[in-house]
């Protein structure tokens, strides 16, 4: 067990290190001169050279990489070229928005998918099952940005139940939650369609196993057998997909935040790319990658929590 | 008391069980033998109210005088574990692999009997001790994969006993176990049946295990109960041609004659294989494989005959002998 933890943690750190190399390399090989973007085409060669010197763009690649990683470890991602404030401040300001959205999306996805998936499996080859299969097929086929616009048109413009966009901040929790409803649904619906199908097929496989018959023979209700015996045993594939979906949800916030005018990291990365704001983009890409790697790391640990047989082997 | 009268199970045109009649009283130890597909597990599932949804049932099943024809799934849930419990063939697969065996056994105690956590734990410890699990306190905390096959089967027996049922159905309880473990489990079931005055329905294709465990036996073939009677009498002098074939196919160290070269003869077998449910002959199910078949066997259903005291069989050849 200790060896398993050590191995997984080592893998986690090495992956992050590899990600940092790739992110740094890609960002610094990409064409486009940040100095030119900031000062404009009329800038004099001297001014450009001075700015490059100030940003450290003339230093050797390797030393720039190490100083970037070294500073990043202390929470210093440099100064944003376009906003002229430390990148860490920009992130700290917008991270809660994106985390709120991603977590809300994840909760929505998991709850909807489990209810639909287990419900479909319990009604295998009946109307409920066909209904879930049809709706989830539809959900997978619909692009998130188009769904967002439909939701805004219906619930914000026509019915006027919910705000069409923007975020008032968490100082007014009710308003904040209302503002999050449409983005959450737009973000999570596609993912929950995928997850509902995974849940359904995983549950169907478990329902064929002998211990489910034992549970029925012990006089438990169908509901109890489903939630107490079938679901936990169906969880390993579900958690695998949830881990991958969390990554998709975090990156999905880029589109959703732009559609709903939410001041989060997704909008920030979009603006920074347009402004060739190298330190900000680099830090954000690294942060998104770190979130994804962390999610996968947690999933790896969850397997062992779910299934005691894996602990014995680990 | 459990009473079946002419209970049949159909899957569309196919018949899985044909007009089975049985009575099980407290303390009875009844064995059911037959090949796979003979309908013995279907009979057991009917007693649990767990026949597959696709099946249509006819005939009557009464439990303590109550006709179960109109019973809902909820009614059955109230009977399972408390009145009738079942243990299954594969002890490895029959336990939830993610649940500590103690929790598995405590679940029905808490849910059905409403015991507190401490009371359920104490009761589970008693049950583990009763079914012969050593060091019960430590076992309670273990997962199924940490136990041996025999230990798992004992856990399943403890689970089945949890709510003190009147009838314990054991469907091939020893098939997946080593021979000496199988013997001990068989003896355990007999002891529990006697101590608790609990009826035991012991389903197996292992004639030696059935002989050891039961006082009465029903032999099944193709969905019919072809022969019934006291275990000893039926095994000593089988009446139905199928039972005779089944007993002849039993391997034994000494019974096979040697030929001139000193080699033992091949084990006799019943010719042919069990036909599918839909291809069974309309008359006697054994027609086509029977060594003493009469011309009308395949088309006419044989009537019940009494080949001896407390015994019955369905066979045209036997009814001819009896009437002659």
Image (cartoon, coloured by chain):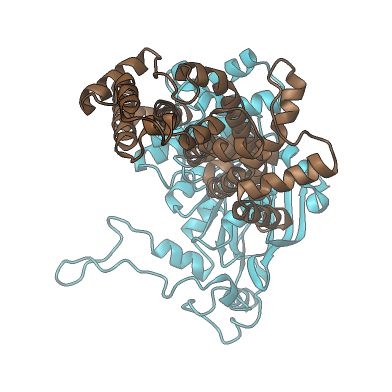
Chain colours: A brown, B cyan
Give the side of residue B292 with respect to residue B63, left or right. left
Say if residue B3 shows up in the picture: yes
- Residue sitting farthest toward the right: A159
Query: Of residues B25 and B55, which is closer to you in this image?
Result: B55
Query: Of residues B283 and B254, which is closer to you in this image?
Result: B283
Residue at image point 72% right, 26% down: A177
Name which quarter of the figure residue A44 lies in.
top left
Say if residue B194 shows up in the picture: no
**Residue B83's spot in the image, x, y percent?**
70, 37
Query: Of residues A272 and B111, which is closer to you in this image?
Result: A272
Seen in the picture, residue B11 relative to B289 is either above or below; the reply is above
- Say which quadrant the C terminus of chain B sits in: bottom right
Residue at image point 35% right, 28% down: A312
Residue at image point 57% right, 56% down: B40
Number of numbered discs on residues? 0
Residue at image point 79% right, 45% down: A154
**Residue B108's spot in the image, x, y percent?**
65, 29
**Residue B139's spot in the image, x, y percent?**
45, 22
- Residue sitting farthest toward the bottom: B295
């Amino acid at each position: 067990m200790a060896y398993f933890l050590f191995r997984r943690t080592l893998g986690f750190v090495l992956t992050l290190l590899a990600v940092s190399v790739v992110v740094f390399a890609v960002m610094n090989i990409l064409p486009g001169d940040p100095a030119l973007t900031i000062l404009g085409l009329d800038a004099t060669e001297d001014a450009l050279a001075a700015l490059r010197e100030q940003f450290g763009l003339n230093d050797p690649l390797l030393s720039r990489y190490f100083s970037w990683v070294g500073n990043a470890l202390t929470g210093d991602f440099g100064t944003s070229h376009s906003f002229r404030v430390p990148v860490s401040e920009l992130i700290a300001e917008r991270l809660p928005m994106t985390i709120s959205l991603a977590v809300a999306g994840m909760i929505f996805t998991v709850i909807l998918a489990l209810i639909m998936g287990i419900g479909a499996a319990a009604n295998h080859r009946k109307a409920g099952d066909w209904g879930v299969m049809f709706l989830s097929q539809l959900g997978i086929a619909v692009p998130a940005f188009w769904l967002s616009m439909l939701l805004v048109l219906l619930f914000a413009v026509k019915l006027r139940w919910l705000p069409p966009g923007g975020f008032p901040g968490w100082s007014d929790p009710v308003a904040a939650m209302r503002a999050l409803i449409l983005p959450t649904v737009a973000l999570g619906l596609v993912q929950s369609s995928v997850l509902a199908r995974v849940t359904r097929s995983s549950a169907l496989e478990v329902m064929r196993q002998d211990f489910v018959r034992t549970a029925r023979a012990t006089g438990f209700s169908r509901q109890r057998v489903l939630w107490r015996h079938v679901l936990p045993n169906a969880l390993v594939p579900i958690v695998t997909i949830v881990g991958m979906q969390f990554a998709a949800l975090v990156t999905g916030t880029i589109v959703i935040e732009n559609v709903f005018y939410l001041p989060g990291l997704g909008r920030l990365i979009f603006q920074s790319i347009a402004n060739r704001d190298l330190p900000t983009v680099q830090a954000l890409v690294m942060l998104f990658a770190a979130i994804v790697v962390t999610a996968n790391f947690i999933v790896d640990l969850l397997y062992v929590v779910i299934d005691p047989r894996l602990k014995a082997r680990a | 008391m459990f009473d079946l009268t002419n209970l049949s199970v159909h899957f569309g045109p196919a018949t899985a069980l044909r007009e089975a009649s049985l009575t099980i009283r407290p303390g009875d130890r009844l064995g059911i033998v037959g090949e796979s597909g003979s309908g013995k597990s279907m009979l057991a599932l009917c007693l649990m109210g767990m026949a597959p949804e696709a099946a249509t049932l006819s005939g009557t099943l009464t439990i303590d005088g109550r006709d179960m024809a109109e019973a809902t799934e909820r009614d059955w849930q109230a009977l399972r574990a408390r009145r009738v419990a079942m243990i299954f063939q594969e002890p490895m697969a029959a336990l939830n692999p993610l649940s500590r065996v103690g929790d598995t056994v405590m679940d029905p105690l808490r849910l059905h009997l409403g015991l507190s956590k401490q009371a359920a734990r104490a009761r589970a410890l008693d049950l583990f001790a009763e079914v012969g699990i050593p060091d019960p306190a430590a076992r309670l905390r273990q997962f199924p994969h940490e136990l041996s096959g025999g230990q798992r089967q004992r856990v399943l027996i403890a689970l089945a006993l949890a709510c003190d049922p009147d009838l314990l159905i054991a469907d091939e309880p020893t098939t997946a176990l080593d021979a000496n473990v199988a013997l001990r489990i068989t003896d355990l079931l007999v002891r529990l049946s006697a101590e608790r005055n609990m009826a035991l329905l012991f389903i197996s294709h292992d004639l030696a295990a059935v002989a050891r465990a039961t006082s009465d036996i029903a032999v099944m073939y193709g969905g019919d109960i072809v022969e019934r009677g006291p275990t000893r009498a039926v095994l000593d002098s089988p009446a139905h041609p199928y039972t005779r074939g089944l007993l002849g196919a039993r391997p034994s160290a000494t019974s096979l004659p040697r030929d001139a070269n000193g080699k033992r003869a091949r084990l006799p077998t019943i010719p042919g294989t069990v036909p599918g449910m839909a291809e069974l002959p309309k008359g006697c199910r054994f027609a086509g494989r029977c060594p003493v078949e009469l011309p009308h066997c395949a088309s006419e259903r044989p009537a019940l005959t009494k080949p001896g005291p407390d015994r019955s069989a369905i066979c045209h050849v036997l009814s001819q002998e009896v009437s002659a």
